[in-house]
Image: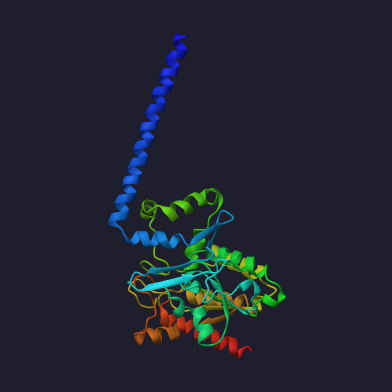
Amino acid sequence: MAIYLSFTYSLKKSFKYVLKIGFGIFFLLFLGEGIVRFYFPDLKEELRYKQIHCLQQFSEIRLCPEVNETFTRKDGKPWDIQTNHLGERTVSMENPENSTTKVWLIGDSMAMGYGLPTNKSIAYLLKNKFNIQTRVLAVDAIGTNGILSLYLDIYNRVNLEGKPTHIYWIWNPSDFIDDEREKKGFRKLIYPIHFYLSRFSVLYNYAIRSPKANVYEGSPILYPKSHTTYTNLKNFFRKTSDHKEHIRILFSWGMAPNGTPDTRDPNYEHSKVFFTSQKIKTIDLRRETEIEFAQKKQIYIPEDGHPDEDLAELFASAIAKDYKNSQ
C-alpha cells in the first residue's frame, strides 16, 4: 500500500512538473508572437497574404476560392486579387466551368500576377485591351510539378468544348529553386503542419523567412541538364504530349539584386535550347525588356522582382500577337 501511495504521489508530482514546463513554453511562445507582431508589422501583411492560400490533398497549394482581398506591396502601392469558386484568379466573376475560354495562362506567381492590381494584370489586359478571354491557372511558388498538377486537374475536368487551343506559360529560372524545395518523403508528410503554422503564426514566419522570389542573390549559376527541373519539364511535356503543340513558353529577364535586368543569367539561353529540343515554341522577350527598362518603364516591382505593370503589358501584347497570328 505504501509503495502504491508513493508511486501515485510521484506520478502527480511529475505531472505538475510537466504541466509547469508546458505552460512556460506556451507563455514564451505567446510572448514571442506578440513581440514579433509589434516590432515587425510587415510580417502581418505577409501572414494575411498566406491566408488566401489553401491546402489540397495534404501537399498541393492552391488559391482559396471566393477571395476578394487588397494587399500592400513593398513599395507601398496597393494591389488586389479576386478568385472564383475554383480558386482561380479572375478579372470578373464568370463561372469558368461553363466557359469556353480557349486561351489559358499557366505558371506560378508571374502568371498569377503577384503584386499587380486586377486592372494591370495580364489576363485583364488581354480581355480589355485585346478582347481575348483568358483563364488563369497559376499559384505562386509551386514549381514545375505543381504547375503540371494544377493544369491537368482542370484540363481533365473540362469537356471538349472547354479545352484550350492556346496555352501560355510565363516561365522563369526561379523554377530551378522551387523544384529543389519540392516536398518529398518525410517533408511531404509533415508539410500540413508547416502550412498551417505559416498561415497563422507571425513568429513562425519570422523564424523561417523565405528568400525573395525571382531575385538572385550574388552571381547566377548555370544549372546542369541533370537538374531536377529539366527532368520535371520532360515529364510535363510527356504528360501533355497529345496537345503540347498548343503550349508557348514566354520569358523575359528576371531582376538582378541591383534592380536591373539580370542579363548575366545563363539559364535563359540554355533553357530556350532545351524547350526547342522538346519542340515547344518560345516567345523570348528579353531584348524588349531591356529596351523598356532603358526607357524608365515600370518593369519590376521594387525590392521584389515580380513583373510590374509595363512588363505585364509586354507579356499581354506578345500573347495577343501570337494568338491573332495563329488564327
User: Looking at the image, what colour scheme do you see?
Assistant: rainbow
> What residue is shown at x 29% (from left), y 55% (from top)?
38
Is residue 21 visible to the viewer in this orientation of the structure?
Answer: yes
In the image, is 19 to the left or to the right of 167? left
In the image, is 204 to the left or to the right of 95? left
> What residue is shown at x 42% (from left), y 53% (from top)?
200
Viewer-side residue, 229 vs 319: 319
- Asked if residue 255 is positioned above or below residue 13 in the image, the reply reads below
Direction top: furthest residue: 1
Viewer-side residue, 221 vs 292: 292
The quarter of the picture where the C terminus appears is: bottom right
Q: Quadrant of residue 157?
A: bottom right
Give the x, y percent position of residue 162. 67, 76
Is residue 223 visible to the viewer in this orientation of the structure?
Answer: no
> What residue is shown at x 39% (from left), y 74% (from top)?
255
Q: Quadrant of residue 94?
A: bottom right
Give the x, y percent position of residue 210. 40, 59
Direction left: furthest residue: 39
In the image, is 252 to the left or to the right of 154? left
- Asked if residue 36 is positioned above or below residue 45 in the image, the reply reads above
Give the x, y percent position of residue 187. 52, 50
Q: How many marks?
A: 0
Give the x, y percent position of residue 144. 55, 66
> What residue is shown at x 60% (from left), y 90% (from top)?
325
